Amino acid sequence: MRALVVAPQPFFSPRGTPFSVYYRTLITTQLGVDVDLLTYGEGQDVEIPGLRIHRIPRFGFLGPVAVGPSLLKLWLDGFLVLWTLGLLLRRRYDFVHAHEESVFFLRFLKPIFRFKLVYDMHSSLPQQLSNFKFTESRALIRLFELLEDSCLRRADAVITICPELRDYALPRVSDPRRHFLIENSLFDEVRLARVAGNGAGLPRDPDLPLDRPIVAYAGTFESYQGIDLLIEAFARTRTARPEAFLLLIGGSAEQVASARALADRLGIPGDVCCTGRLDPAAVKRQLRRAAVLTSPRTAGTNTPLKIYEQLASGIPLVATRILSHTQVLDDRVCFLADPDPDSLSRALLAALEGGPACARVVQNAQELYRRDYSREAYLAKMSALLEVLH
């Protein structure tokens, strides 16, 4: 089989976190499909046998592509349409794998070029227009809702990435047997085609204390991630565990400065390390040293990608009790807390305590990952998808 993957993302760029595209493509090629991938100019090529990467112009002078809807993405998606037409005119594809908003134009190209269409739904795009405050126009949002419903009905297969999104999409899918819940649960190291210069300009690994239990967070520092909540909870935790140390990985220079200022105000500047962004290999090295991993998110419905790696890590996880987490996590596999400083502090203390109860939680987490989210489980889900397309 031959497939075209259309990914409106800066592929591959850890800042843009297009890991779902990478792993979907990796597994698809391993299942014997020949893949062309069309993506933005920004990013770094990866090494996947059987994959050819095609890029639109970068337009670097317009700045980097941010997460969420934007005028820049709208501009780039116009070129994505033109490049898609060029590929469809030159080659015949058995199916086209449309990530996110690319499905909106591929849905209309499907009857013309007679390919089967896979809609990889990472989120509801009409909801994104509101959540990212891109527009308040009810007419525009309603138009996108109608387009989204049409794409869900017309697609030959629909992939969603979490139970909440599955429940949203299923009533709109014409045949439930063509829906597949495939979580972004893989975390193998990405094989970059050009290693030289990777991570250039990023900070070196921080010098962390070897004799203190490290509470670690890694990810973006957007407001919904709960960084301030975590720092405030950690300040309370130190009254009972003064030897604890907080490691925060990620964030822009402004966001890191804000986190450090909060630590200063709370009187714990020497007990918090904010590294800024690190390259993925460095992040993994630092997280392996942690005594506790955290996901203090305060809002959202999509499950964070890092949750699956945290489940498999063998390190106790503390997370907030919100839908974004609880559709995957429960009290058997992690230490859940309400999204307030006192509750989160109690969960951190329970995880730091260790002992048999903590060991059972860690063991349950690893068993859950092996059963439902491991490479074997992911491979089986992708194989079922390809069977439907055959």
Image (cartoon, rainbow, N blue to C red):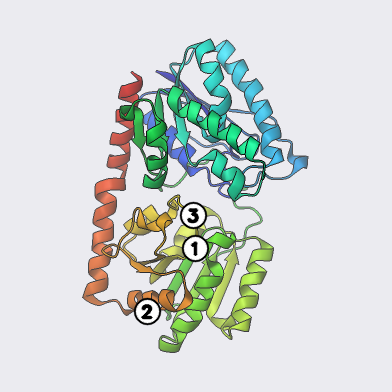
- Report if residue 209 is visible in the image: no
Instruction: Quadrant for the N terminus, please.
Output: top left
**Mark 2 sits on what residue?**
349
**Mark 1 sits on what residue?**
298
Cα–Cα gap, marks 1 and 2:
20 Å
| Mark 3, secondary structure of its residue | loop
State the image coordinates of residue 185 (x, y, percent, origin top left): 38, 47
Front-lying residue, 67 or 92: 67
Q: Quadrant of residue 309?
A: bottom left
Relative to 188, say whether 26 is above or below: above
Q: In the image, what residue type sits under mark 2?
A: Leu
Cα–Cα gap, marks 3 and 2:
25 Å
Q: In the image, what residue type sits under mark 1?
A: Thr
| Number of the front mark, 1 or 2 | 1
Front-lying residue, 42 or 132: 132
- Residue at (52%, 37%) from the top-left corner? 46
Q: Quadrant of residue 255?
A: bottom right
Cα–Cα gap, marks 1 and 3:
7 Å
- Residue at (48%, 37%) from the top-left corner? 21
Front-lying residue, 241 or 106: 106
**Mark 3 sits on what residue?**
300
Q: Callout 3: few (<14), some (14-19), or many (20+) C-alpha neighbours within 10 Å?
A: some
Q: Is residue 71 left or right of residue 225?
A: right
Task: Tell me which label, 3 or 2, sits earlier in the chain.
Answer: 3
Instruction: Quadrant for the C terminus, please.
Output: top left
State the image coordinates of residue 35 (x, y, percent, origin top left): 47, 24
| Mark 1, secondary structure of its residue | loop
Q: Callout 1: few (<14), some (14-19), or many (20+) C-alpha neighbours within 10 Å?
A: many
| Number of the front mark, 3 or 2 | 3
